[in-house]
Amino acid sequence: MSDPCSFSSFTRCVTKHLNLSLHVDFDRNVIRGKVELTVEALEDRFSALTLDTRDLKIVSVSANGQAARFNLGPKHSFKGTPLEITLPFDLSRGQHVIVEVTYETSPLATALQWLTPEQTAGKKHPYLFSQCQAHHCRSMVPCQDSPSIKHTYYAQVSVPKDLVAVMSAVRDGQEVDPQDNSRIIYRFRQPVAMPSYLIAIVVGALESRKIGPRSRVWSEEGVVEKAEKEFSETENMLKTAEDLAGPYVWGQYDILVLPPSFPYGGMENPCLTFATPTLLAGDKSLSNVIAHEIAHSWTGNLVTNKTWEHFWLNEGHTVYLERMIGRCMESEQFRQFKAMGGWKDLQESVNTFGANNPLTNLVPSLQDVDPDDAFSSVPYEKGFALLYHLEELLGGPEVFMGFVKSYIQMFAYSSVTTEDWKNYLFTFFKDKVDILNKVDWNAWMFTPGMPPVKPQYDTTLADACIALCQRWIKAKDQDLSSFKECDVKSLSSHQLIEFLSLLLQEVPLPLTHVKKMQEVYNLNACMNSEIRSRWLRLCVRSRWEEAVPLALKMATEQGRMKFTRPLFREVFNFDKYHDEAVRVFLANRAAMHHVTAGLVAKDLKVDVTKTTSL
């Protein structure tokens, strides 16, 4: 078993624990670090190991306190640079060594985003956040950067005293930095073994509010009160998830609301879920994102994909669990409705990649593929569709949830492949093997495009959306007066999102129709990000020029890829504004997260090596 995305020698040794000492330097935008890795040898006469690094400056390496020879290999475009270490002694199988590496990160470290005070909500202090998934931890810490390796970690982080540090771990006290009394050291411990991609750090002018017996919400001043209200359902959701999946093992469950440039909706860092501020616009999709990140505490964090080729094991099961939480808290019809929306998202991803693109396989090959380029809704929604299909075949939600809970117990604290999962499925349902043998596994797993079976979802909550969508598509100019504000008054925000998603699957509406829609529904006034992004895409697609600046404003005011990429693509495809999309991207690129900037550049066919943004 090898990991195509890592140089580290994990067939020969495994990391059991990391001890991190980090000094955060906002003047130079670097972290000066020292990491002690407790490494266990898996073979006799073990005397050399390789760690993953990316753009790190290595100062020194020692093993059990003795200087060790080291060498940085050739740099790979996205895997970084192997750090080859020769130990000054041999180990026998099962013995441990403490390898200590002193290093410094690059100002351009891909895991880290350094924000100037102007890029924060408070405008007074700088801010740092990390995003290590999938393979960026190596730009922050030299490590075995593969999800197949799990370890505990302790950390101490020195920061300027007017700032606060938080990590994906339990807070363990603070003290004035003995080396510099203008700084504070924050301590953390993570006693549950986890993969390197879940190491996370944030440093900023943070405040927190208690939102439950094991939860606080963290964000900048001015955002924290709003966040406190929005996340009040957190404990209910945690309890619901525990009823479904078993005990929550991570101790605290805090939520951190990041600045707008954070590229994802959420990130399931243990003990500290990261959340996009786009959720704070009175947004009903908030509960989906938080339910999703809570569910990851079991599927992803406790049971982890062994390599990124098996990412669907993390995401498909998490979407399944997220929707089961929705079923318990809302209704089965609500789960069905969300599943239909997910199928549409999958259709859109397949259309964007192309139906023959191997990256639309449920289990793609990532040999020489950057995992960031493979990111899409495929592992989420194709994965969910397979699990839902199996649920239907094997006896319904209660029966299949029994399997999911048992799978989590079986593989807790370890990393798994699709084959491990499938073997366990056949073992668990040993009396239904004849049914499982009828599933076209090759079509589901290793064939690009849409799944071989489309589940028949209950359309009760979708019917109103479908009917209203059809009215708009069929309406002639003389029918437009029949549309009234009350058409959408009875729809939930989830249904309004669905209505706009349905329209986006159709031929663009005539401009007269979109203008009438604004006149009667006043969607320009809606600040719910899920609704607004779809509405602006619809307007641009119908060539409403007044919507172009609004679409570009939304694409750059926040950096969540789910919104930023489609908005830029839509304006780019409007011939008259093709160059404007590129100009606005280049003007804003420096303030964007590097993953977002890289993918938008690809979408807009901008060669970033040739352009410099002023």
Image (spheres, rainbow, N blue to C red):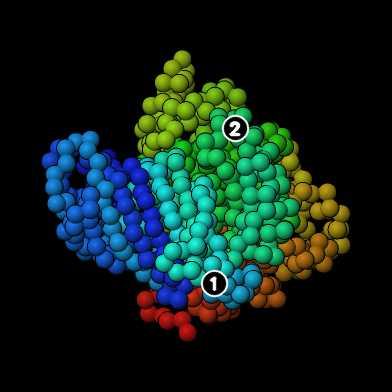
The residue labelled by disc 2 is: 242
Tell me which amino acid carries mark 1.
Pro
Alpha carbon distance from label 1 to label 2: 37 Å
| Pick the front one: 580 or 473 | 580
Please indicate whether residue 2 sits to the left or right of residue 315 in the image: left
Residue under the image location 43 percent in, 27 percent down: 410
Q: Position of residue 49 (x, y in %)?
A: 21, 50
Q: Residue at x 44, y 64 (%)?
A: 178
Q: Amino acid at mark 2?
A: Glu
| Disc 2 crowd, CA 10 A, few/some/many (<14, 14-19, 20+) | some
* Residue that numbered label 1 is attached to: 126
583 up-or-down from 455: above or below: below
Drawn side of residue 181 relative to residue 82, left or right: right
Q: Are marks 1 and 2 in contact (CB under 8 Å)?
A: no
Residue 533 appears left or right of 411: right
- Corner quadrant of residue 142: bottom left
**Does residue 347 sit above or below 177 in this rendering?**
above
**Label 1 vs 2, first from the N-terminus:** 1
User: Looking at this view, is 470 or 156 the one in front?
Assistant: 156
* Residue that appears at 26% across and 51% down: 99
Percent position of residue 562, x then y: 56, 58
- How far across and down, in percent of the image, does residue 437 sit? 42, 24
Task: Report whether 52 appears left or right of 461.
Answer: left
Q: Residue at x 47, y 72 (%)?
A: 26
Badge 1 crowding class, 10 Å Cα cut-off, few under 14, some 14 to 19, many 20 or more, is: some
Q: Determine if residue 544 is in view.
A: yes
Residue 77 disc label:
none
**Element under disc 1:** loop
> Secondary structure beneath disc 2?
helix
